């Protein structure tokens, strides 16, 4: 069924039907291509409807929401207490959370913007008119309600995460919107403190430029996924007409550190009349009633708003914070060009203005289906931000058949990734970008047009040819992470934070995969300590290699190794009691128990005795470690032992450190690779 759903495409004759429906005065049509999203069609029940005989329209789950609800329920039946749903902008993720939370008593919805919370409250009341809602943010501190809407900045503080305000089991169901932010401190505080029956993370863009892994926060339980390409193919979002326009701005003159351009220098480069005129010309060429322009900085947004306004296009800038009064562009700091976010959105909807220029205030939480053009006026440094901003124009609306995307592209870093972001091939983006070939037309979503200036095609080819060697890239990534983290990245940290696209390349090449021999990688980049250098080429090094490479269909080997590790006091032999305690502790930690639940032979683990745990350990990991690694393991009666070749290393701090790090890395990689297998299942 899942395979059929993934392959289903909107039949072409539906387009003709939709065009006919667009001209019909009856706006109550309910075809299967709609999702419960347009809140304007639904109203909370109130006294004005009582005894009037009027039919009140309630939203119901449709399309991908039905599929996601099925998978969420299935996930809970399998024993999961948290999960993530990845769905393109416009699919109705908030409605999905509303429907899914109906059988839970007390719910909290967490987001980072109050506007998102207000929109979410409207959605919940559409589905549950009788509920009592409350807000927990900077000013309001309500809690006596059925559903609480809270800003992460407030509720994530330690002064509120305690028994005086909230019990750990205060909420049965937690929704974390825009879950790609959840690696930040306050989000982690919330996730670590509360113990709900279920936690749902929602995002359209789980990939992060900094390499941090949001899937780990939900124990790699990807419940459901519908990405941009599939959503367009199924008719849930409008197609795009993308125009890649060559921008002659020379980004090589701008300082770039850790993959990020200097904002002030970038602003200076892009805020010139020649470039603004290029943008204006293409805006006029493709015509637009309501457009969004994404800029590099607040001053750049004001500059563009003024330029358009003075050329007869009613425009404004929506920016956050205070404008730099010492900047030479302070003459633009007046109400003619700067507008409050809410006012600007209303004026755009009502056609009082035609373009809003902003930096990142509209990346999330913007619900304006009327937008018919999106302009990218800054370099694409983050795939997440690119897809978020692209999604602002894809919501369906009566009479809207497509959205125009104008992207002004120069010789900035990662520019050659854009064609593959549009095709939806995010997983292999870095490798394919180096092939210097554009995706074939049939890789783009149905009915979409993608057109790159010939100069850009040449630019992409030139960039691919100039790419550094893979090892040099990995080395650069290592030192970037070292600077960002403020310490030397070990296996687990490197694996967690490495650029996803870079990792997708090295994982398929044994000679380049640093995680198959991290010790040797550290030696190559001169990052080993003196004590670690002494371990190179020894049995201790070989043992670490064995942990890094050992085959795993389950996590069973990890608690066995942890029994030897013994909290840093490494044992040369372990007995049944050690195996039992280690297995019990390991599968009581986090969601490791799900690895037992997913196999019929171990799904009743809650009823296991000590004898059962020991039996599983002896028949599986102990047996296979003896077979595959006799140079490191042997049995002596009832004892399971390390060979004497390791005895002289067990007290060395360097060996102890890398022993535990290798175990942690393999545990994390096991769950992540299991997630990737699930992704492949979604794609089939």
Image (cartoon, rainbow, N blue to C red):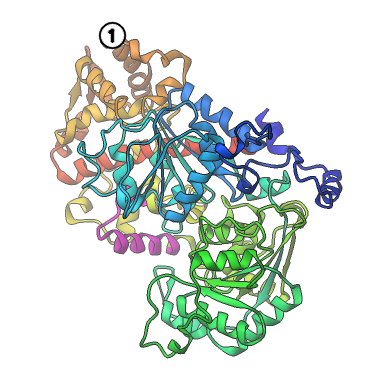
Tell me what residue is drawn at x 41 percent, y 52 percent. 181
Identify whether 538 is placed above or below 329: above
Identify whether 453 is placed above or below 106: below
The stretch in magenta equals: 472-494
Q: Residue 478 lies in magenta, yes or no? A: yes
Q: Is residue 328 left or right of residue 642?
A: right
Residue topped by disc 1: 611
Q: Residues within 10 Å of mark 1 (few under 14, many from 20)?
A: few
Q: Residue 135 lies in magenta, yes or no? A: no
Residue 534 point in image, percent of width and height: 20, 50
Majority SS type along the magenta span = helix
Residue 459 point in image, percent of width and height: 64, 74
Give 393 or 24, whichever is nearer the viewer.
24
Element class at badge 1: helix
Q: Is residue 85 left or right of residue 114?
A: right
Residue 159 visible? The answer is yes
Tell me what residue is drawn at x 21 percent, y 44 percent. 657
């Amino acid at each position: 069924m899942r395979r059929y759903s993934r392959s289903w495409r909107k039949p072409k004759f539906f387009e003709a039907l939709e065009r006919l429906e667009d001209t019909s005065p009856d706006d109550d049509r309910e075809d299967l291509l709609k999702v419960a999203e347009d809140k304007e069609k639904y109203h909370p029940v109130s006294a004005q409807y009582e005894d009037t005989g009027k039919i009140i329209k309630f939203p119901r789950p449709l399309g991908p929401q039905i599929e996601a609800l099925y998978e969420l329920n299935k996930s809970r039946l399998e024993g999961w207490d948290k999960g993530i749903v990845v769905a393109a902008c416009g699919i109705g993720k908030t409605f999905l959370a509303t429907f899914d939370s109906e059988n839970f008593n007390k719910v909290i919805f967490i987001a980072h913007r109050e506007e998102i919370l207000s929109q979410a409250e409207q959605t919940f009341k559409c589905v549950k008119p009788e509920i009592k809602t409350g807000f927990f943010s900077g000013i309001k501190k309500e809690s006596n309600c059925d559903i609480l809407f809270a800003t992460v900045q407030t509720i994530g503080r330690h002064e509120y995460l305690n028994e005086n305000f909230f019990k750990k089991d205060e909420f049965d169901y937690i929704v974390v919107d825009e879950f790609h932010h959840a690696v930040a401190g306050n989000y982690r505080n919330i996730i670590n403190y509360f113990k709900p029956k279920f936690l749902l993370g929602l995002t359209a863009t789980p990939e992060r430029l900094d390499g941090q892994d949001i899937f780990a926060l939900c124990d790699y339980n990807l419940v459901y996924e519908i990405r941009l390409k599939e959503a367009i193919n199924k008719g849930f979002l409008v197609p795009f007409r993308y125009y890649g326009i060559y921008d002659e701005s020379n980004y090589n003159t701008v300082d770039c550190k850790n993959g990020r351009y200097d904002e002030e220098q970038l602003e200076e480069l892009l805020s010139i009349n020649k470039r603004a005129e290029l943008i204006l010309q293409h805006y006029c060429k493709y015509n637009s009633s309501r457009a969004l322009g994404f800029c590099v900085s607040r001053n750049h947004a004001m500059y563009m708003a003024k330029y358009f306004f003075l050329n007869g296009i009613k425009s404004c800038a929506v920016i956050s914070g205070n404008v730099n009064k010492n900047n030479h562009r302070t003459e633009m700091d007046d109400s003619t060009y700067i507008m409050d976010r809410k006012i600007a959105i209303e004026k755009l909807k009502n056609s009082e203005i035609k373009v809003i220029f902003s930096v990142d205030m509209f990346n999330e939480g913007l619900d304006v289906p009327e937008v018919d053009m999106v302009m990218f006026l800054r370099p694409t440094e983050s795939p997440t931000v690119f897809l978020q901003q692209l999604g602002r124009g894809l919501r369906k609306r009566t009479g809207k058949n497509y959205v125009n995307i104008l992207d002004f592209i120069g010789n900035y870093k990662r520019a050659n990734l854009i064609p593959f972001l549009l095709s939806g091939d995010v997983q292999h983006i870095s490798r394919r970008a180096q092939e210097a070939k554009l995706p074939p037309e049939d890789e783009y979503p149905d009915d979409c047009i993608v057109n790159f200036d010939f100069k850009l095609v040449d630019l992409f080819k030139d960039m691919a040819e100039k790419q550094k060697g893979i090892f040099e890239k990995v080395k650069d990534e290592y030192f970037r992470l070292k600077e960002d983290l403020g310490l030397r990245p070990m296996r687990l940290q490197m694996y967690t934070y490495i650029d996803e696209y870079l990792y997708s390349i090295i994982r398929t090449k044994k000679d380049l995969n640093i995680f198959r021999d991290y010790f040797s990688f550290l030696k190559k980049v001169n990052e080993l300590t003196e004590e670690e250098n002494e371990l190179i080429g020894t049995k201790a090094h070989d043992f670490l290699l064995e942990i890094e490479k050992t085959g795993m269909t389950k996590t069973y080997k990890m608690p066995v190794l942890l029994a030897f590790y013994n909290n840093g006091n490494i044992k040369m032999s372990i007995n049944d009691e050690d195996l039992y305690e280690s297995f019990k502790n390991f599968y009581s930690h986090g969601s490791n128990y799900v690895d037992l639940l997913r196999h019929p032979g171990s799904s009743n683990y809650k009823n296991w005795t000590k004898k059962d745990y020991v039996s599983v350990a002896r028949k599986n990991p102990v047996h296979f470690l003896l077979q595959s690694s006799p140079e490191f393991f042997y049995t002596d009666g009832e004892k399971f032992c390390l060979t004497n070749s390791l005895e002289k290393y067990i007290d060395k701090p360097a060996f102890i450190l890398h022993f535990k790090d290798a175990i942690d890395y393999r545990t994390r990689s096991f769950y992540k690779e299991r997630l990737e297998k699930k992704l492949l299942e979604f794609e089939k």
